[in-house]
């Protein structure tokens, strides 16, 4: 039940973010020819713990169900600088429209996971339990 609620919350949160970001449409995406396809690879510029894959998936699903994402990492995984996180393919307009919103979720969620993992490592083996 909790997992269904989490997915519902992600969907609603993404909808709100997309509405705020693009409103009635992405004007700059209109500059890209409708038939133009694109591929991209997203990499991390620093070591991190990944968090937010479901949210990135939901952003792209809401923008365009035909966008394909191939994740190369999983939530909770410690990654190295310059490591590819995912590859994405589809309409260039759709990739452009979803990119900013998706990264606006992935970056702070991963930053929170990264700092949380750091603090957990500081108290590892001490008997201290970190709470939210």
Image (spheres, grey):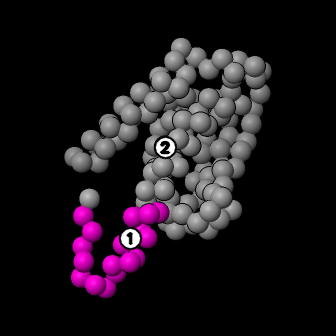
Q: Earlier in the sequence, mark 2 or mark 1?
A: 2
Q: Quadrant of the C terminus?
A: bottom left
Of circles 2 and 1, which is in front?
1
Residue drawn 77% across and 27% down? Answer: 36
| Local secondary structure at mark 2 | helix
| Res. 57 in view | no
**Where's residue 6, x and y in %?**
31, 44
Q: Residue furthest bottom?
A: 125
Q: Which residue is mark 1?
A: 119
| Res. 54 in view | yes
**Where's residue 115, x and y in %?**
44, 63
Residue drawn 32% across and 37% down? Answer: 9
**Where's residue 123, x and y in %?**
33, 78
Q: CA distance from mark 2 to mark 1?
A: 22 Å
Q: Which residue is mark 2?
A: 105
Is residue 4 left or right of 109 when viewed as pictured?
Answer: left
| Magenta-tinted stretch | 114-131
Structural crowding at the residue carrying mark 1, measured as other residues with C-alpha within 10 Å and reported as few (<14), some (14–19) or many (≥20):
few
């Amino acid at each position: 039940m909790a997992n269904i609620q989490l997915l519902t919350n992600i969907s609603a949160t993404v909808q709100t973010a997309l509405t705020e970001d693009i409103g009635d449409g992405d004007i700059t995406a209109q500059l890209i020819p409708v038939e133009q396809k694109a591929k991209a690879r997203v990499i991390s510029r620093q070591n991190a713990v990944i968090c937010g894959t479901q949210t990135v998936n939901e952003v792209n699903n809401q923008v365009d169900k035909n966008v394909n994402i191939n994740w190369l990492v999983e939530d909770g995984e410690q990654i190295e600088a310059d490591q590819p996180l995912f590859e994405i393919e589809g309409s260039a307009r759709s990739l452009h429209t979803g990119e900013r919103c998706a990264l606006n979720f992935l970056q702070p969620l991963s930053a929170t996971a990264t700092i949380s993992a750091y603090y957990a490592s500081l108290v590892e083996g001490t008997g201290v339990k970190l709470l939210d």
